Amino acid sequence: MITLPVVLAFAAVLFGIGLYGVLGQTNAVMVIMGVELMLGAAMLNVVGFLRFAHQDSTSGAFFVLILLTLMALEAAIGFGLVISTFRNRRTAEVDDLTDLSG
Amino acid sequence: MSDLATALVFWPVGALMLVTALYVFVTSSMARAGLLLLAALALEGLLFLALASEFLGVLMLLMMSAEMVIMVFFMVMFMPDPGGLMGMDMVHDKRRSAGAAVVVGLLLAVVAVLTDWPAQMLPPDAPDVRAIGFEVMGRSMFSFLFAGMAILFTIVGGIMVAKQGGRYGVGAPAGEAREG
Amino acid sequence: MSDLTPFAILALAAVGAVAVASLETLVAGFRPAPLGATRQALAGLRQPISHPTTYDGWLFHLAPGLLLLAALAALAMVPWAPGFRGIDLETGAILFPAALAYVTPAVFMAGWGGGSPLPVIGGFRFIALMLGYAMPIAMVATAVAAPAGSLRPSDIVDIQATVPMALAQPFSLALWLPAVMAVALLAPFDVATAPHELGGGAFERYTGLEAALVALARRVLLLAVAGMTAAFFLSGWHGPLLPDWLWMAVKTAAVAALMLYAGRRLPRLETDRLLTLAWKVAVPGAIAAIVLAGAETLLFYS
């Protein structure tokens, strides 16, 4: 049977997969995809709490709406930055963007 | 949905969601990676529907299709091997990042399972669309307004960041090749 | 909604696809022969499923299924009669654009899976097109749902008992029709999948069962889109003399005939003109349509 810990565990594993993408992938677009997965895991958490703990909470639903909006916004700005980086340096790999590292 | 129906939907869809999410980073074809991410997030939308959040599930399904197709677009533009035929390894620090991911995931899962949540399996009394609408337009109007302004700034800012020549509109020099 | 509703929708899809194919031949100027067309289509199934030499297997073979799934999901949202409202979800007016939005990945998968450059270009053209046209569909659905105060399609039909939305919000209808024709792969917006465009478009590489599935899905899409236009804008099943389902059938057929006829008469728009129309006209216009719908709701509907 589905209980709150089950939903939260699924969201935790999804968060871990997203974290693997963010930390491990070399291309900036793949990093953005990892962040999308992490935000998706957060949304699954909130929906789980909505279903099991606060059934009539409209502000929880609104929070998921805001998270959904943020997913899209972050991807949009991220892609704009990737375009700009690619235009100036001909590469979108995060390993080559080391100007600021000591 | 009844408990049994929810369980019957949740376990396979949830497992498939995790598998497709993992394959996003395993596959070497860029089109497949983007579409696998679409599959993972669309399955998450189905999970929302199974958890009695109808409006949020439908919104998730609606937005993810367009977003992920855009992502495929960008990946084919900017990745060195979009077809995936050369089998390049695009991972750095594979063991450390995988280790960190496993540790964090396990930690969160353990916290989730071991905590004594004050939550019960009540029948879903989820807010319907009208209630969410009244909430958005009433009590949360301030946050909604800020979200709207954030969208506007992102539209304008994203285009300015991506534009050739940046803010001041200076075009590419005459002799430069038309790249990007 | 009873337990038999999904089967009824599948039966409606099968029969409706034949009806739409007959309508296409009729609009083209020939006498429609539904039995002959069905027999010919079934004979085409005997063709073996072949694929290009270098192709992306998973994407190529999954695309027709996804297209059919999207078309059936869209068809399930249409309310046909008070006794048969489809899967009358509370958020049906948002699930309809969501189902239509999955046509874009399906066309892209068909194009990319085709392996050679020309279908890939067709797939990317469709993405570029639908990025602009997906938003007006959802926004106009919201504008039409505002007077009804509900996202349930049958509520939107019932609010039009006196005045159809085509008269109350003509601007919304003008934005809805091109967007919905673009997503249903209809001319004059079909630069990505038309048989006379670059190499045959995104679906050109399919044979046998998969080509039949694509053809079926396209006709089901047209049926769903025409039905929803009749439900959202032409008062659905409300009308003086005829029974409910007959009014709905007449209105759907009229809308479908109008779309097919416009496809035959108007020249195919080029990509840049399509994108200009989408981003400079349709999206701001849809926002204005929502504002107008809100004002109208406050003045007339409450």
Image (cartoon, coloured by chain):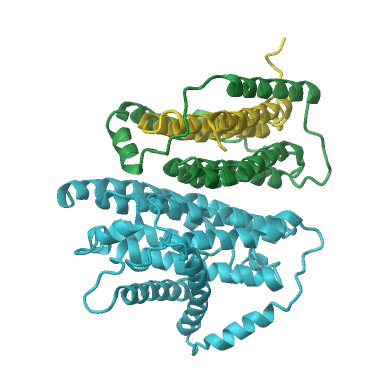
Quarter occupied by the C terminus of chain B: top right
In the image, B102 versus A2, the foreground residue is: A2
**For the point 66% across and 55% down, which residue is it?**
C109
**For the point 36% across and 38% down, which residue is it?**
B127
Placement of B85 over or under B132, stated as above or below: below
**Chain A drawn colour:** yellow
Tell me the cyan chain: C
- Residue ranking furthest to the top: A102
In the image, B107 versus B149, the foreground residue is: B107
Left or right for B93, reference C59: right
Placement of B31 over or under A25, stated as above or below: below
**Chain B drawn colour:** green
Left or right for B59, reference C242: right
Placement of B76 over or under C226, stated as above or below: above
Residue A100, located in which quarter of the rendered image?
top right
Residue C269: give x, y in percent of width and height: 49, 64
In the image, C166 versus A2, the foreground residue is: A2
Residue A14: give x, y in percent of width and height: 63, 32
**For the point 29% across and 28% down, which residue is it?**
B139
Residue C213, located in which quarter of the rendered image?
bottom right
**For the point 58% across and 41% down, which residue is it?**
B41
Q: Is residue B169 visible?
A: no
Residue A6: give x, y in percent of width and height: 59, 32
Residue A32: give x, y in percent of width and height: 62, 32
